[in-house]
């Protein structure tokens, strides 16, 4: 983090080429052919790159490595605010191309992290397929691609008591918990995901066995909060729970849940 009044760090073209493991001539060719717009202030004859520029170039390279044309990769990497990534993901899903769908998701995860990818790419794509005319096969392809991409976020090692994640009994919507597991891993917290539709008795058994730092239960449909024995910290996620609870915490978004579960006690 920069100190107040300190200029953000920037890098030369040569340094960035080394970060990307590319010849400097390739980086120059990308600028010449695709007109890459840099966010770092430019002064003098030599290009300078800030962290946002480097992330965009990393994302561009990742897309190229996954088989996208250089022009498409440049457009998607340097213009993420135009909804292009959602359109690209939906196009791959519509073609039932899981490999390309995963590549789009991984590029976004690499550039922006789990929470931003969930909010700006995964949820809009799921919403686009979730109307009355949605095709179940496309929803399944998208959900599978999201799950695979999230599972590739490496799990932390040796981080103390894990956080236990489970769906309420009768609820099978595990994808939000997959996103939470990956976001926690990205923040150095380990989590154990029990899966869909966990009966309350089974949840209590899992708490007794694992002694988790917290228990997160997701429900997308009306449900009663589980009664856990002992002093297990309970977090209720999803729209199915009552508005208020006596002892449970209620995050309103993935970002809220991550902040809540990673805050120092």
Image: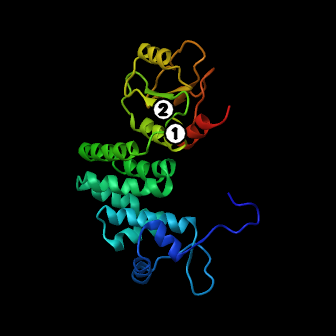
Q: Is residue 187 above or below residue 204?
A: below
Helix, strand or loop under label 1: helix
- Kindly identify the residue that appears in the image at 46 percent across and 51 percent down: 117
Q: Quadrant of residue 206?
A: top left
**Residue 184: percent from the left, percent from the top?**
52, 39
Q: Is residue 125 above or below residue 144?
A: below
Mark 2 closeness class: few <14, some 14–19, many ≥20 residues within 10 Å: many
Residue receiving disc 2: 191
User: Would residue 134 be seen by someone viewing this image from the given angle?
Assistant: no
Quarter occupied by the C terminus: top right
Using residue 264 as the reference point, say whether residue 253 is left or right of it.
left
User: Would residue 262 be seen by someone viewing this image from the given angle?
Assistant: yes
The reply to whether dot 1 and dot 2 touch (C-beta < 8 Å) is: yes
- Kindly identify the residue that appears in the image at 36 percent across and 30 percent down: 172
Q: Quadrant of residue 45?
A: bottom right
Q: Is residue 62 above or below residue 218?
A: below
């Amino acid at each position: 983090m920069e100190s107040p009044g300190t200029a953000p760090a920037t890098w030369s073209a040569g340094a960035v080429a080394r970060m990307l493991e590319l010849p400097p001539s390739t980086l120059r060719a990308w600028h010449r052919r695709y007109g890459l717009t840099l966010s770092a202030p430019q002064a003098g004859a030599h290009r300078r790159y800030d962290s946002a520029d480097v992330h965009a170039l990393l994302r561009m390279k990742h897309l190229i490595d996954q088989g996208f044309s250089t022009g498409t990769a440049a457009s998607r990497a340097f213009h993420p605010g135009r909804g292009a990534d959602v359109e690209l993901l939906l196009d791959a899903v519509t073609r039932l191309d899981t490999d390309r769908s995963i590549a789009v998701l991984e590029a976004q995860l690499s550039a922006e992290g789990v929470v931003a990818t969930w909010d700006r790419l995964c949820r809009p794509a799921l919403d686009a397929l979730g109307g009355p005319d949605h095709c179940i096969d496309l929803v399944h392809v998208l959900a599978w691609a999201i799950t695979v991409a999230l599972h590739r976020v490496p799990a932390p090692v040796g981080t103390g008591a894990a956080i236990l994640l489970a769906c309420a009994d009768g609820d099978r919507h595990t994808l939000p918990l997959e996103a939470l597991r990956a976001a926690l891993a990205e923040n150095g917290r380990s989590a154990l995901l029990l899966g869909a539709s966990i009966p309350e008795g089974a949840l209590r058994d899992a708490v007794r066995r694992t002694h988790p730092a917290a228990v997160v239960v997701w429900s997308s449909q009306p449900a009663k909060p589980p009664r856990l024995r002992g002093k297990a910290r309970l977090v209720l996620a999803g729209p199915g729970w009552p508005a208020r609870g006596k002892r449970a915490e209620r995050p309103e978004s993935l970002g809220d849940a991550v902040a809540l579960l990673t805050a120092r006690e």
